[in-house]
Image: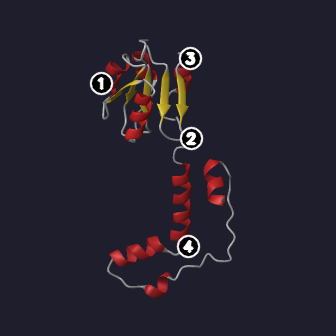
Amino acid sequence: MTDQPKVLIAAKMSPDAETILRDRGVAVDVITGLDPADMFETLGAYDGLLIRSSTMVDAAALDAANGLQLIGRAGIGVDNVDVGVATARGVVVMNTSFGNVVTAAEHAIAMMMALARQIPSADRSMRDGKWEKSRFVGMELAGKTLGLVGCGNIGSIVAT
């Protein structure tokens, strides 16, 4: 490893990621859209790799990444990374589990409201050229009780 760690951002993400790393003395290359063969050739030059869900990091990728020390996944899961192989090779795998929890909670609430008011069905009906106003009255949420199954990061925000 050189004096300055080198990170490859291999997926489209906020420009803030690059700025944050550079501000902390990290050399950053942003190369998105690499096919697996090109990524295998490229990975050997980096200490860290930042990805999203569409980038797969399997044993073959890790074989090519002999200097890799960290894989950061912008998002909640790490199911696109062979964590077992990475761990066996001393590569730390981490995610940003709180990165989009407010967005996900707001989306869940929006979907509940859309379903309660029958917005998807009414939209489809309108797109089909119908005007079925009385069919899509929906229900008011006032006075209703919402039950949550699970109050993890997202569920807790929905509850709040």
- The CA distance from mark 2 to mark 1 is 28 Å
Sequence-wise first label, 3 or 1: 1
Q: Quadrant of the N terminus?
A: top left
- Occupied quadrant, residue 146: bottom right
- The CA distance from mark 2 to mark 3 is 23 Å
Determine the secondary structure under disc 1. helix
Residue 88, numbered label: 3
Mark 2 in CB contact with mark 3 (< 8 angstroms): no
- Occupied quadrant, residue 11: top left
Seen at 34% across and 25% down, the residue is 39
Sequence-wise first label, 4 or 3: 3
Seen at 44% across and 23% down, the residue is 48
- The CA distance from mark 3 to mark 1 is 24 Å
Q: Is residue 46 above or below residue 97?
A: above
Mark 2 or 3, which is nearer the eye?
2
Label 4 neighbour load within 10 Å: few <14, some 14-19, many 20+: some
Q: Amino acid at mark 2?
A: Ser
Residue 37 position in % (x across, y down):
31, 24
Q: Amino acid at mark 1?
A: Asp
Q: Is residue 139 above or below residue 158?
A: below
- The CA distance from mark 4 to mark 2 is 29 Å
Q: Where is mark 1, residue-wise?
A: 38
Q: Amino acid at mark 4?
A: Ala
- Pick the residue in front: 9 or 27: 27
Mark 4 in CB contact with mark 2 (< 8 angstroms): no
